[in-house]
Image (cartoon, rainbow, N blue to C red):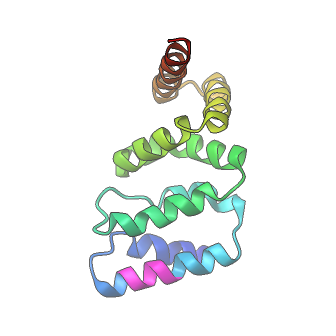
Amino acid sequence: MINLLKTLKENRLMKTPEEVITFEETLERIAEDPHDEYLKDLHLILDDNCEQPDLMFGLVHFLESFELQQQIEAFIAVIPQLMITAPEWTKIIHYRIINDELACKTYQKSLELANEKTPHFLYQLLNESVKNHMNSKQILAIS
């Protein structure tokens, strides 16, 4: 698995047809036998400099195939690092989570716990975003 993750990381920019093929084939191999202990590492494959964002979405979909709590906890754990190399992908995952009611509630609780354990301004900002999103949905439901 370590070698497969290394291969994904080496080919994540997908600048050549060979890198595209290698990335796709490697992701397929990982998906055949997924291991949740590598969720953090898989999130860190995301890179805003990727030249094939539609194929990178395959990684996002794969991440979403894991158990919700595990996926969210892994995402939260790597947000500070992910914001450096993949701020756009971080936003995409954030918005995908908050647009699912169950995921949003799980995310909010997990952000609060993460911020209690290791206070970080990003956790606070994201939690405020979640709260604002939930409040706006409540306002729309009342209207």
Residue 4, given in percent of the width and then of the height, sits at 57, 78
Q: Nearer the viewer, residue 139 or 30?
A: 139
Residue 9, quarter of the rendered image: bottom left
Q: Is residue 66 left or right of residue 93?
A: right
Residue 127, given in percent of the width and then of the height, sits at 53, 24
Q: Residue at x 43, y 58 (%)?
A: 46
Q: Nearer the viewer, residue 49 or 84?
A: 49
The question of residue 23 being in magenta is answered with: yes
Segment colored magenta: 20-25
Q: Is residue 2 left or right of residue 90?
A: right
- Please say if 18 is above or below 39: below
Q: Nearer the viewer, residue 122 or 23?
A: 23
Quarter of the image where the N terminus is located: bottom right
Is residue 1 at least partly visible in the picture? Answer: no
Is residue 21 at least partly visible in the picture? Answer: yes
Q: Residue at x 40, y 50 (%)?
A: 89
Residue 38, given in percent of the width and then of the height, sits at 65, 61
Residue 94, given in percent of the width and then of the height, sits at 48, 40
Residue 32, quarter of the rendered image: bottom right
Q: Residue furthest bottom?
A: 18
Main secondary-structure element of the magenta-colored stretch: helix
- Please say if 138 is above or below 73: above
The question of residue 63 being in magenta is answered with: no
Q: Residue at x 36, y 82 (%)?
A: 19
